[in-house]
Amino acid sequence: MAEDIYEISMLLDFYGQLLTDSQYKCMDMHYNQDLSLSEIAEELGISRQGAHDFIKRGRRALAEYEEKLKLLERFCEMKQTLKTIQEDLQLIDRSGMQSGNLYMLDQIDKNLFKIITKI
């Protein structure tokens, strides 16, 4: 369930602006703000069933966008590749290296860490 919420939240980040305003609001409130359908309905002045329908259609639209564009899939693959590069960098034997090379390896490691933590 938590993975599903995380995935939907990520899909909203990538494709949310392609949804209708009502779909986006309902999905954002439900998945990012953790509001119940009743709370969403009250906040937006719609029925609980209306909130459910907006979320259902929004989920379907997000799945279709991801199926066609694969932005989230590629993002996750790139993030994992960066983590693997960083792990491999840690395995390099640094004994006997010149200080300039050690400095460069440390800079590469720091830059990879910055990228990984920002994405």
Image (cartoon, rainbow, N blue to C red):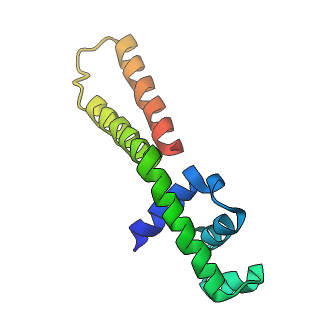
Residue 100 against residue 28 in the figure, above or below:
above
Residue drawn at 57 percent across, 52 percent down: 15
Residue 17 against residue 54 in the figure, above or below:
above
Between 64 and 83, the one lying in front of the other is 64
Q: Position of residue 67 (x, y in %)?
A: 41, 52
Quadrant in which residue 19 is drawn:
bottom right
Outermost residue toward the right?
Answer: 45
Between 112 and 14, the one lying in front of the other is 14
Residue 34, visible in the rendered structure: no
Residue drawn at 50 percent across, 37 percent down: 114
Q: Position of residue 70 (x, y in %)?
A: 43, 46
Residue drawn at 64 percent across, 80 percent down: 51
Give the total of numbered labels.
0
Residue 113, visible in the rendered structure: yes
Q: Position of residue 36 (x, y in %)?
A: 60, 84
Left or right, 16 with respect to 63, comes to right
